[in-house]
Image (tube, helix red, strand yellow):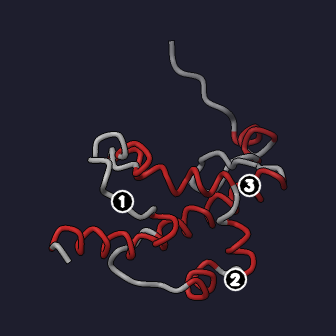
Amino acid sequence: MPKKTLTSDLQEGAIGRGKTPARTRRISLRKSERNALALQEIMEGAVARFLDLERDRSWPQVAEELGISLHQLKELVKTPEFVELYNTPFAELGHDPREQHRDRPQGVELPLPRVLGARGLQEAVLQGLSGG
């Protein structure tokens, strides 16, 4: 039995209206969903910039790159969602400082990455390894 195809008048009606020129479906998001998605993208961008060891950025530079004010960035990093997103790479790699305290000797103090930032943590570890 031959496969049925839609006639051109049906393709341009209700069925065809929800498709882009590439014939893929468009997804319609509500305003709250669009805002949540935009906020998620900003948080991921901020985390990527804070954890970037190749390039040192100041808070104002990060805010400018993300297109938000410095005050908005400082408020953003206080949210539980941001903290969870920031801690995810440490937990995935097995380098979560909160878990490592069980394995190290009691006299060794390591600074928290949130206080020092990624660059400060890297320098602290290198200083500890070199004995200085």
Q: Is residue 25 left or right of residue 15?
A: left
Q: Nearer the viewer, residue 81 or 64?
A: 81
Q: Between marks 1 and 2, how big is the CA–CA gap?
A: 32 Å
Residue bearing mark 1: 109
Residue visible at 23% across and 69% down in the picture: 128
At mark 1, the secondary structure is loop
Residue visible at 18% across and 68% down in the picture: 129
Q: Are marks 3 and 2 in contact (CB under 8 Å)?
A: no
In the displayed image of the protein, which residue is found farthest to the left?
130
Q: Give the residue type that dot 1 points to.
A: Glu
Q: Give the residue type that dot 2 points to.
A: Leu
Residue 70: where, in percent of width, then height?
A: 69, 83
Residue bearing mark 2: 70
Residue 9: where, in percent of width, then height?
A: 76, 41
At mark 3, the secondary structure is helix
Q: Nearer the viewer, residue 86 or 131?
A: 131
Q: Are marks 3 and 1 in contact (CB under 8 Å)?
A: no
